[in-house]
Amino acid sequence: MYFYPIEESDTASYFYKSITSEDKNGNAIERVFTKSDQLVRITRSSYNAEGRFNQEETENYNLSGELISQKTKNTDNGLFLAKYYDKGTYIGEALLTVDRTYEITKPGSSDVVTTEFNEFEPAPFTDKLIWQKHLMKNLSYPQEARSKRAEGTVIVALHITEQGKLEKIEIVNPVGSEKSLIEEVLRVTKSYKGQFLPARDLDGNPIKGWLTIPVRFKLS
């Protein structure tokens, strides 16, 4: 997956550009490009009449133009089905279920493995509660944001290495997000000392990958 890289000197700056258009049915289509006009993501938003829910269909590409993932997400409840690829080869899929666990399937096997984490994407090494406790203990509502009555969800992306180390931190949605909220999320994320579980390829080998974490700010 690809996001909006930030600079320490300006947490709201980014190097990718987004173009939004509509199809003939009025559904939104967002395309994200690099500065050199390389397409890295397409997101189509629509209403699923059969299932009666709003959905997003997202395709992510690497800088060589190869498809790396396809995700269909129910935006009403957050559930999704994602398929993953490595150098053009399908390596498996993950279904996020209503009990917030993942059902993992891989080619060549009829087994469905239920797990707490999506092994195709990085995840905290231990229980998710550790991250939640870290947020509860350290996250503050910036006074600047309070003064502006600013609310919203800041989505932070962590690039995790094959060794499970945090290599890079980026903000997915800097445009439209309050700058002081972004800075607070970055501060708290950088102070997190927990370990991470790297993503894995078809053979079970650890690979680099992105972990996205939403952080919501809401005034009482």
Image: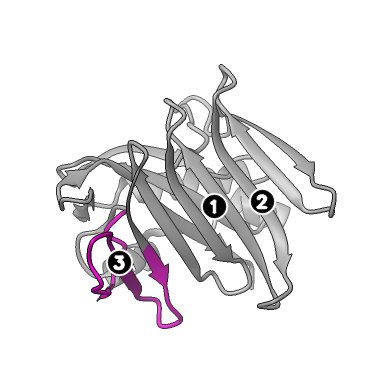
> Which badge, 1 or 3, is on the more N-terminal residue?
3
The magenta segment: 94-120
Vertical relation: 148 (above or below) 127: above
Q: Which residue is mark 2?
A: 44
Total labels drawn? 3
Measuring 27% from the left and 61% from the top, which residue is drawn there?
Answer: 106
Crowd rating for badge 3 (residues with CA inside 10 Å; few <14, some 14–19, many 20+): some
Q: Which residue is mark 3?
A: 105
Residue 24 image position (x, y, % from top left): 85, 49
**Between marks 2 and 1, how big is the CA–CA gap?**
21 Å
Vertical relation: 156 (above or below) 107: above
> Which badge, 2 or 1, is on the more N-terminal residue?
2
Crowd rating for badge 1 (residues with CA inside 10 Å; few <14, some 14–19, many 20+): many
Residue 198 image position (x, y, % from top left): 22, 50
Q: Are marks 2 and 1 in contact (CB under 8 Å)?
A: no
Disc 1, SS: strand
Residue 82 sits in which quadrant?
bottom left
Residue 179 sits in which quadrant?
top right
> Which badge, 3 or 2, is on the more N-terminal residue?
2
Q: Amino acid at mark 3?
A: Thr
Q: Is residue 208 left or right of residue 51?
A: left
Measuring 72% from the left and 60% from the top, which residue is drawn there?
Answer: 46
Name the residue nearer the viewer: 91 or 39.
91
Q: Nearer the viewer, mark 2 or mark 1?
A: 2
Disc 3, SS: strand
Q: Which residue is mark 1?
A: 154
The answer to whether residue 211 of the structure is visible from this angle is no
**Any magenta on residue 106?**
yes
Q: Amino acid at mark 1?
A: Val
Crowd rating for badge 2 (residues with CA inside 10 Å; few <14, some 14–19, many 20+): some
Q: Quadrant of the C terminus?
A: bottom right
